Amino acid sequence: MGDLVTNPIAETIGFGDITIKLEEYAQLPVGGQQFTRNSIVSLYHAGDGSGRMYAGESDGGRIVIIEADGSVGATPILDLKAIYGADLIDNQKPTGLRSFAFHPDFYKPGADGEGKFYTVATMSVVGGGTEVSRI
């Protein structure tokens, strides 16, 4: 096998002239039961040239629109908690919205996929003494 190399990068890597500055861009609405602020599980650009982004929140089960200027739309485009109620959130287990994806034809007027997107969520369902997780 040959001799072992104790340090594959013998020279010290110097600092460059790149500086990173973090600035707050958007503030999501107040969270639900588990967290003060919701965890973002997915963040996608709109893909339509508008500069908008879509943020999926885990605990609240919402997908909200973040406009190009950083303002957040007052009404989510999806609210799974409103659909599934208390079954969506379980304070003892990781539940809620996990991910979402837009149909490739989401923005194509008249296409079968226009306005469609897909979600993955986990929730606890208790019934008959047996607890299961649904996806």
Image (cartoon, grey):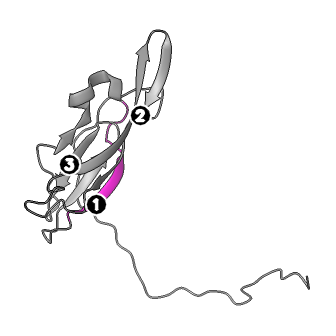
- Residue at horizontal 36%, vertical 28%? 89
Instruction: Judge from the rendering whether residue 37 lies leftward or rightward of residue 91; answer left or right.
Output: left
Disc 1 to disc 3: CB gap under 8 Å: no
Residue type marked 2: Thr
Residue 114: horizontal and vertical position, in percent?
Answer: 14, 56
Distance, label 1 to label 3, CA atoms, is: 11 Å
Q: Is residue 132 left or right of residue 46?
A: right
Residue under label 3, please give it: 64
Tell me which segment is drawn in magenta. 34-46
- Which residue position holds label 2? 95
Residue sitting at x 48%, y 30% = 93
Q: Could you tell me residue 127's position as x and y percent?
A: 42, 13
Residue behind mark 1: 44
**Residue 59 falls within the magenta-colored stretch:** no
Inter-mark Cα distance, 2 to 3: 18 Å
Residue 88 on image: x %, y %: 34, 29
Q: Amino acid at mark 1?
A: Tyr
Question: What whole-number distance in Å separates the C-alpha atoms at marks 1 and 2?
Answer: 21 Å
User: Residue 30's spot in the image, x, y percent?
Assistant: 24, 39
Query: In the rendered structure, which disc, 2 or 3, sits on the residue that comes first in sequence?
Result: 3
Please say if the residues under marks 2 and 3 sit with CB atoms less than 8 Å apart. Answer: no
User: Residue 39 magenta-drawn?
Assistant: yes
Tell me what residue is drawn at x 24 percent, y 51 percent: 117
Residue 69 seen anywhere in this rendered image of the structure: yes
Q: Kindly state the secondary structure of the residue where label 3 is placed.
A: strand
Relative to the observer, which residue lies in front, 114 or 70? 114
| The quarter of the displayed image where residue 104 is located | bottom left
Quarter of the picture holding the C terminus:
top left
- Specify which label sits upstream in the sequence, 1 or 3: 1
For disc 1, the neighbor class at 10 Å (few under 14, some 14 to 19, many from 20) is some
Q: Toward which corner of the image does residue 10 lie, by quadrant? A: bottom right
- Secondary structure found at label 1: strand
